[in-house]
Image (spheres, rainbow, N blue to C red):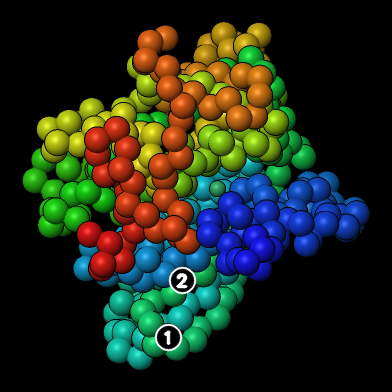
């Protein structure tokens, strides 16, 4: 069978198919398919508008046994707001469409919306509509978030150059550690580390304030959010920028507490996914100023490597030693693979047969 007729096997492949068939034709469109959000400029508008959508399906993206509806509401809006944060956008509005099984309780629905609305409020996003339908295969949640630029300053995945320093916000791998705890039946935290890991996984907080600050700073060349894992998302930003990258694992902001649970913090950070932190590139000449002026009250930023020449050049090393290729190991809905990397399975789907 020719490759043309075979089914796409990965999210990246499907995205490429859509991009090929959807040329950016409208003069109002600044960015179409392939970035964290679409960007357009309405006629006579002072600012750009950003639109992003995400779908969460029960037993694929979440399990009801592992989360309460209020947390699920918070997470559902957060993953969308994270895509606005990734471009430096200010959240404004969102819509919610739900497919619900007929057995769902009124209380579940009210608590879910409570979580959605309170997390939207925190970041300035107002619920303005949606749709409801019945589902015979679990809960389906689809959210569309709308944001606006500030001073038309929007950051894309493209724009990074050879030599740029790579940074991330927050801690990587904590959410994946939380997912491992859930797989092991730890639903209620007994220690501070467990509470942090479960919280990161169940109700991540989007980095909207950081994203806006970075876009306004004028020091960042490109940015995206980390939803599928550094080893999957970094190659996406590199491909959009036409460069490669090398990551120093000695510099990664790790969730080291996971070692006590027989998990490898480096593997979690590289391949874990669902961190919803930001990844961005800064010209070497601006790194000192960035680190000096970055506000102390925002989540910390960490320099983890640099962009290099050659889009296929993706490497990891440990403080200059043990240099090896960065293997893609994050989560892909259409492969739904268990990731075995560096000796630890770190990221699975939520399907009941995945374990
Ligand atoms: Mg994203």
Which residue is the extreme one toward the front?
1
Give the residue drawn at x 31%, y 66%: 351
Mark 2 falls on what kind of element?
strand
Q: Which mark is residue 141?
A: 2
Give the residue drawn at x 43%, y 22%: 324
Q: Which mark is residue 252?
A: none
Give the residue drawn at x 59%, y 74%: 129
Along the line of sight, the residue nearer the viewer: 196 or 31: 31
User: Dot 1, how many residues are within 10 Å of its Cα: few (below 14), some (14-19), or many (20+)?
Assistant: few
Give the residue drawn at x 46%, y 26%: 325
Q: Is residue 123 left or right of residue 105?
A: right
| Residue 258 x %, y % | 20, 35
Q: Is residue 220 visible?
A: no
Q: Which mark is residue 135?
A: 1
Name the N-terminal-most of marks 2 and 1.
Answer: 1
Compared with 3, 191 (above or below) is above
Along the line of sight, the residue nearer the viewer: 273 or 100: 273
Compared with 174, 180 (above or below) is below
| Residue 317 x %, y % | 41, 18
Compared with 138, 118 (above or below) is above
Mark 1 falls on what kind of element?
loop
Which residue is the extreme one toward the left?
190
User: Dot 2, how many residues are within 10 Å of its Cα: few (below 14), some (14-19), or many (20+)?
Assistant: many
| Residue 16 x %, y % | 67, 54
Q: Is residue 129 visible?
A: yes
Q: Is residue 136 left or right of residue 355?
A: right
Q: Are marks 2 and 1 in contact (CB under 8 Å)?
A: no
Quadrant (top left, top right, bottom left, bottom right) of the C terminus: bottom left
Q: CA distance from mark 2 to mark 1?
A: 11 Å
| Residue 67 x %, y % | 26, 63
Quadrant (top left, top right, bottom left, bottom right) of the N terminus: bottom right
């Amino acid at each position: 069978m020719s490759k043309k007729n075979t089914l796409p096997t990965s999210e990246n492949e499907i995205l490429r198919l859509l991009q090929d068939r959807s040329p950016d034709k409208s003069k109002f469109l600044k960015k179409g398919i392939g970035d964290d959000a679409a960007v357009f400029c309405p006629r006579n508008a002072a600012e750009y508008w950003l639109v992003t959508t995400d779908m969460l399906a029960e037993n694929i993206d979440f399990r009801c046994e592992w989360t309460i509806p209020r947390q699920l509401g918070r997470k559902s809006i957060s993953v969308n707001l994270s895509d606005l944060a990734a471009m430096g956008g200010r959240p404004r509005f969102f819509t919610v469409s739900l497919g619900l099984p007929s057995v769902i309780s009124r209380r579940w629905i009210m608590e879910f919306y409570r979580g959605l609305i309170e997390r939207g409020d925190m970041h300035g996003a107002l619920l303005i509509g949606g749709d409801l339908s019945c589902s015979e295969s679990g809960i389906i949640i689809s959210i569309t978030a709308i944001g606006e630029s500030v001073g038309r300053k929007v950051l894309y995945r493209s724009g990074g150059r050879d030599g740029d320093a790579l940074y991330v916000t927050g801690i990587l791998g904590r959410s994946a550690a939380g997912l491992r705890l859930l797989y092991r039946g730890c639903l209620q935290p007994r220690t501070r580390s467990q509470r942090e890991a479960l919280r990161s996984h169940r109700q991540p907080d989007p980095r909207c304030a950081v994203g806006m600050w970075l876009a306004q700073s004028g020091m960042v060349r490109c940015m995206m959010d980390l939803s599928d894992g550094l080893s999957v998302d970094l190659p996406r930003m590199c491909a959009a920028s036409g460069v490669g990258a090398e990551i120093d694992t000695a510099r990664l902001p790790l969730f080291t507490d996971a070692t006590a649970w027989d998990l490898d913090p480096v593997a979690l950070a590289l391949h874990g996914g669902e961190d919803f932190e930001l990844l961005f590139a800064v010209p070497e000449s601006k790194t000192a100023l960035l680190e000096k002026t970055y506000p102390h009250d925002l989540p910390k930023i960490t320099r983890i490597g640099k962009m290099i020449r050659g889009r296929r050049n993706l490497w990891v090393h440990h403080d200059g030693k043990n240099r090896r290729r960065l293997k893609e190991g994050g989560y892909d809905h259409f492969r739904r693979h268990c990731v075995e990397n560096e000796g630890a399975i770190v990221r699975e789907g939520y399907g009941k047969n995945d374990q």
